[in-house]
Image: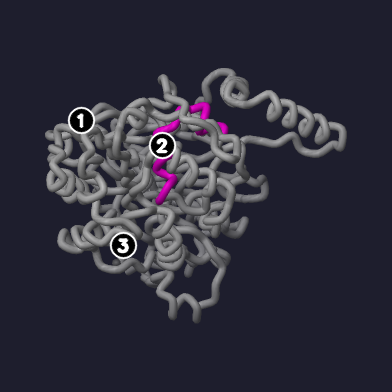
């Protein structure tokens, strides 16, 4: 991955090349994750033939008749279609035809995807041969119990009716659990009340944090076992969504190694010395909601005098999130969310929470607040965030949302930034080439060069 010629935009809607012209006097520093070469079909097949802590899938599922595959939704860039043909072949080897396989797109509290979204995710072979279902977190669920943390496990009925469950998803930085992937796929098939309880029950670890032993991840591990998910496949991708790593088997055994790989490959430096910070939100630029939650960390960690640009197609428009709505929250959202959680709490827990809240009020402490993936905008930044939407997108957005200025002209944004910086020469530009995959960490140059954690290409515009 070497230059701006490799940039992409419009995830799931063409993954189109992104071409940008920079002023000649800008010193542009492209920041890429240093990922290994993409895997071949044979390498993916080999990864499934040698799962961690388990026999191959064909042996695990032998004698089963109602298998179900959980997959993440379009808000995650995971190219599940690359791996499903090999999974379905192993089911066939075990005597289970593809027509008996159900694929559940488990999007958790994300907005319901368009009708053809699951076809994009699973690919033509699975779309033509398997039973496809999209999870709706607001519909009826089956209660299978509570975890030791008290979290109610309310799961999609399709999962409860299956006699063999496997999950396929990607591993990406995540503010709640440090990184997603592994057992986190189970969250996507839960009812909204359970998802809300799970998020509010545990304190967020922070994006890119080491949180394998944290309570959120431990709670997810219990949920995974309770819904019968014993085997999983976790994929990692490069900046253009090519598969570079696959782990399969028992996620409790392989996850630590996969997260360690992600922590090395996807870390990037803070833009402490930047005059301009640019965050390309591909491969997570599906909607404004995902931009806000997954793609703007770099422009929130820059000097207060820096100019800030975000690049995202937002092809599906605003998007939504059922727990942390970013734009146009439903009326009485907070109250309804509280009621959802109250309905699944026990009397003792409700009493304890009331007592804790009263204690904080008496002591004059904070009452708590909803935790989204993005932090509130501090007042000291001098310049706004400019969002550039490449192409002629079908879903229109207003010119400003959440304080972000939205434009469809790259030259206009460049002109605005030049004005903000007083038309100075030699502006230092930090360009995060795939921000949703990257997390920020402070480390010295020597460590960077030796570990391969970041590929820093300087490009003087010509």
Q: Quadrant of residue 377?
A: top right
Badge 3 is on which residue?
A: 4
Q: What secondary structure prevails in the magenta region?
A: helix
In the depicted structure, whether residue 425 falls above or below residue 332: below
Q: Quadrant of the N terminus?
A: bottom left
Q: Is residue 199 left or right of residue 86?
A: right
Inspect the magenta stretch and tell me whether residue 203 lies in it: no
The range drawn in magenta is 182-197
Place of residue 356 in the rendered image (x, y in percent of width and height, measured from the top left): 77, 34
- Residue 19's spot in the image, x, y percent? 28, 55
Badge 2 crowding class, 10 Å Cα cut-off, few under 14, some 14 to 19, many 20 or more, is many
Asked whether 186 falls inside the magenta stretch, the response is yes
Residue 219 visible here: yes
**Which callout, 1 or 2, points to the residue nearer the camera?**
2
- Relative to the observer, which residue lies in front, 82 or 381? 82
Q: Which mark is residue 131?
A: 1
Residue 147, above or below 431: above
Name the residue carrying label 2. Answer: 227
In this rendered view, identify the residue nearer to me: 322 or 23.
322
- Decide which of 293, 172 is in the foreground and name it: 172
Label 2 with label 3: CB-CB less than 8 Å: no
- Nearer mark to the viewer, of 2 and 3: 2
Image coordinates of residue 387 in percent, x first then y, are 44, 44
Local SS, label 2: loop
Q: Earlier in the sequence, mark 3 or mark 1?
A: 3
Viewer-nearest residue: 282 or 147: 147
């Amino acid at each position: 991955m070497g230059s701006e010629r490799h940039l992409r935009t419009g995830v799931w809607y063409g993954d189109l090349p992104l071409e940008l012209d920079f002023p000649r006097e800008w010193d542009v520093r492209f920041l890429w994750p240093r990922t290994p070469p993409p895997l071949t079909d044979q390498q993916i097949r080999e990864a499934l033939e040698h799962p961690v802590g388990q026999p191959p899938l064909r042996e695990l599922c032998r004698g089963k008749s109602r298998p179900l595959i959980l997959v993440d939704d379009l808000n995650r860039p995971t190219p599940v279609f690359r791996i499903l043909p090999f999974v379905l072949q192993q089911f066939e080897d075990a005597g289970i035809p593809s027509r008996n396989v159900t694929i559940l797109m488990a999007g958790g509290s994300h907005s319901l995807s368009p009708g053809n979204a699951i076809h994009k995710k699973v690919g033509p072979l699975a779309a033509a041969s398997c039973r496809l279902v999209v999870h709706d977190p607001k519909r009826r669920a089956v209660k299978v119990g509570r975890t030791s943390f008290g979290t109610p496990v309310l799961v999609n009925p399709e999962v409860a009716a299956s006699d063999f469950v496997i999950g396929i998803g990607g591993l990406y930085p995540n503010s709640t659990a440090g990184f997603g992937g592994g057992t986190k796929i189970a969250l996507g098939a839960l009812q909204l009340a359970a998802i809300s309880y799970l998020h509010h029950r545990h304190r967020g670890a922070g994006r890119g944090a080491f949180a394998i032993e944290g309570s959120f991840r431990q709670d997810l591990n219990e949920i995974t076992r309770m819904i019968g998910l014993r085997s999983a496949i976790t994929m990692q991708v490069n900046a253009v969504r090519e598969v570079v790593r696959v782990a399969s088997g028992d996620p409790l055994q392989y996850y630590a190694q996969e997260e360690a790989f992600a922590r090395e490959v996807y870390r990037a430096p803070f833009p402490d010395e930047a005059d301009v910070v640019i965050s390309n939100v591909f491969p997570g630029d599906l909607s404004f909601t995902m931009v806000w939650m997954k793609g703007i960390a770099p422009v929130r960690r820059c000097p207060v005098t820096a100019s800030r640009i975000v690049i995202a197609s937002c092809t599906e428009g605003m998007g939504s999130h059922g727990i942390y709505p970013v734009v146009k929250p439903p009326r009485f959202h907070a109250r309804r969310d509280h009621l959802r959680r109250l309905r699944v709490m026990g009397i003792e827990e409700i009493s304890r929470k009331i007592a804790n809240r009263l204690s904080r009020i008496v002591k004059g402490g904070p009452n708590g607040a909803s935790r989204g993936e993005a932090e509130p905008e501090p007042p000291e930044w001098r310049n706004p965030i400019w969002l550039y939407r490449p192409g002629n997108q079908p879903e229109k957005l207003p010119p400003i949302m959440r304080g972000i200025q939205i434009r469809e002209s790259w030259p206009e944004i460049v002109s605005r930034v030049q004005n903000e910086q007083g038309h100075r020469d030699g502006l230092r530009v930090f360009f995060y080439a795939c921000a949703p995959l990257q997390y920020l960490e402070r480390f010295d140059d020597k460590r960077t060069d030796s570990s391969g954690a970041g590929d820093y290409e300087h490009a003087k515009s010509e």
